[in-house]
Structure formats: C-alpha cells, structure tokens
Image (spheres, rainbow, N blue to C red):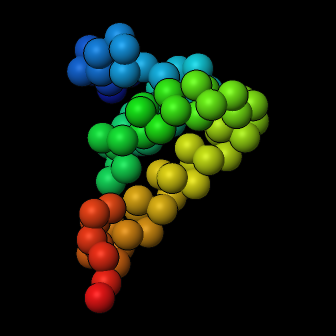
C-alpha cells in the first residue's frame, strides 16, 4: 500500500499512461522502476496514440520491460551499441 502511494506521488499525471493498461500497483511500480522505467510511460502513450489494441499494447509493454532487464543483466544500457 505504501509503495502504491509512493508510485502515484512520483509520477506526474501526464505520465500515467501505464494505468490505461495495468491496474496492479505492484506491476506499475515494477515497470516504472526497471531499466526501461524512464521510457515506459512514453512508450505506452505512443502505442495508444498509434491505435494499438490494449492487448497488443500490454504485450509490447511487458516485452519492453523484459528487454530492459535483459540488458541490465548483461551490463548494457538502452543507449549502448556494440561495434
């Protein structure tokens, strides 16, 4: 419960696109605190703006969060590239 209140307070209203797809506060907190966290609400907004169905958007958002964790385990960042 405290985590849910904390998550709501640190996320600006315009950055709450994840709530359109997820309702569990634990899931919202996990998505926003992972390596993809700083980008995930913007990605959700883009998916909604481009007309993706809710089911497709949820799959893409989960995949993006998983990809961020995958990179983190390999000590990479979203901006890193291999030469």
Q: Residue furthest top?
A: 13
Q: Residue at x 30, y 21 (%)?
A: 11
Q: Is residue 26 visible?
A: no
Query: Going by the image, does 72 lie left or right of 66?
Result: left
Count of marks, rendered view = 0
Q: Is residue 57 left or right of residue 81?
A: right
Please state the horizontal and vertical placement of residue 82, each as a whole percent of the image: 31, 84
Quarter of the rendering occupied by the N terminus: top left
Going 58% across and 20% down the picture, which residue do you hit?
20
**Screen quadrant of the C terminus:** bottom left
Identify which residue, 72 or 2, lies in the foreground. Answer: 72
Report whether residue 81 is seen: yes
Q: Indicate left or right for 57 with 67 as reference.
A: right
Depth check: give the residue in front, 4 or 61: 61
Give the percent coordinates (x, y) of residue 18. Answer: 50, 27
Q: Is residue 64 above or below residue 45?
A: below
Indicate left or right for 67 with 79 as reference. right
Residue 57 x %, y %: 65, 37
Q: What residue is at 62 percent from the left and 47 percent from the top?
A: 60
Observer-nearest of 29 and 47: 47
Q: Is residue 5 above or below residue 79?
A: above
Residue 21: quarter of image: top right
Residue 74 quadrant: bottom left
């Amino acid at each position: 419960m405290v985590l849910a209140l904390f998550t709501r307070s640190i996320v600006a209203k315009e950055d709450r696109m994840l709530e359109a797809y997820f309702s569990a506060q634990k899931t919202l907190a996990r998505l926003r605190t992972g390596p993809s966290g700083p980008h995930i609400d913007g990605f959700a907004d883009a998916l909604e703006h481009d007309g993706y169905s809710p089911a497709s958007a949820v799959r893409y958002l989960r995949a993006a969060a998983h990809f961020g964790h995958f990179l983190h385990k390999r000590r990479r960042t979203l901006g890193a590239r291999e030469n």
